[in-house]
Amino acid sequence: MSVQKQSVSFTDTAYTFARELVEAGEYPNMSAAVSGELAKAKAERDRERSLLEAELERRLSLPLDQWEPVGDAADVTKGARSHLAAMAKKT
């Protein structure tokens, strides 16, 4: 495993969280805390992506007569638009 050095900036909240993880003994230092939490976030995203792909494959394998009507297109994307808006507020 190679190590890439990079200078990063943190919000007060993110820095406090990383420091608390180190102080609690979950990680030996700030670098390990950031790397560890990024690895956890990636694993969670990969898990969610796999679940979504499996569900899409399951639904696409259904015969057309078993498909449920989608309804209004705005309703279909409402949750996604809300999620994206919430993510934009976090950055």
Image (spheres, rainbow, N blue to C red):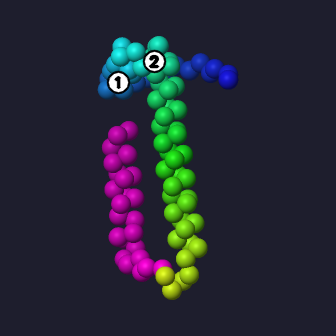
> In the rendered view, would you say 87 is above or below 2?
below
Label 1 or label 2, whichever lies nearer to me, is 2
Q: Distance between the residues labelled 1 and 2?
A: 12 Å
The quadrant holding residue 82 is: bottom left
Q: Where is residue 56 in the image (x, y as percent from the top left)?
A: 53, 65
- Local crowd size for mark 1, using a 10 Å CA cut-off: few (<14), some (14–19), many (≥20): some
Residue at left offset 36%, top offset 60%? 79
- Badge 1 or badge 2: first in the primary sequence: 1
Residue at left offset 48%, top offset 80%? 67
Q: Name the residue under label 2.
A: 27
Prevailing secondary structure of the magenta residues: helix
Q: Is residue 69 left or right of residue 16?
A: right
> In the rendered view, would you say 56 is above or below 83?
below
- Seen from the viewer's position, the closer of residues 88 and 3 is 3
- Local crowd size for mark 2, using a 10 Å CA cut-off: few (<14), some (14–19), many (≥20): some
- The quarter of the image holding the C terminus is top left
Q: Mark 1 points at which residue?
A: 17
Residue 66 numbered tag: none
Residue 15 appearing in the image: no
- Seen from the viewer's position, the closer of residues 62 and 7 is 62
Three-letter code, disc 2: Tyr
Three-letter code, disc 1: Phe
